[in-house]
Image (cartoon, grey):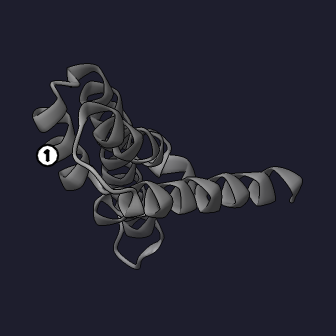
Amino acid sequence: MGAARDVRAAQTSWQRAREVADRIAGDGPAEIDMRIKPRTFLSVHALRFSGSVEQTGLDELRELCASNGDDLSLAIGMGGTCTMQVFHYRFRGWRARIGSRRAPGGSE
């Protein structure tokens, strides 16, 4: 239970960091960078947080990275989001196969 609590605490902290960064005035490179970092973290760990793509702020991350020329943060964030989508797709297929085996008339 401790590890799950730590993951939730980390998610909450990065969500707060995102909110604080969004309240900072200015659109210079330093301010945009402060908005990019929490979104990158939330996107990278989307699978651990079991959230949706919308919750990660990937669209906002993409816009901020494009405006600041930060391809590295975008690549890192997209990697986490892609991993989450692949995992959910594979898990969904695995559940469907198991369900068909248990259903009457299934393959086993």
**Residue 41 placed where, x, y %?**
47, 41
Extreme residue in the right direction: 2
In the picture, measured across the screen, residue 68 lies left or right of residue 83, that is left
Residue at image x 36%, y 63%?
52
Q: Quadrant of the N terminus?
A: bottom right
Residue at image x 11%, y 34%?
66
Q: Which residue is mark 1?
A: 63
In the picture, measured across the screen, residue 5 lies left or right of residue 57, that is right
Q: Where on the picture, by quarter, is residue 32? A: top left
Whether residue 84 appears in this view of the structure is yes
In the picture, measured across the screen, residue 26 lies left or right of residue 107, that is left
- The vertical placement of 102 against 87, above or below, is below
Q: Nearer the viewer, residue 68 or 97?
A: 68
Q: How many marks?
A: 1
- The vertical placement of 75 against 36, above or below, is above
**Residue 103 placed where, x, y %?**
41, 76
**Residue 56 placed where, x, y %?**
36, 56
- The vertical placement of 101 against 30, above or below, is below
Q: Nearer the viewer, residue 78 or 69?
A: 69
Q: Where on the picture, by quarter, is residue 74? A: top left
Extreme residue in the front direction: 26
For disc 1, the neighbor class at 10 Å (few under 14, some 14 to 19, many from 20) is few
Whether residue 107 appears in this view of the structure is no
Extreme residue in the bottom direction: 104
Q: Amino acid at mark 1?
A: Glu
**Residue 88 placed where, x, y %?**
37, 53
Q: Quadrant of the C terminus?
A: bottom left
Residue at image x 27%, y 36%?
78
Q: Where on the picture, by quarter, is residue 4? A: bottom right
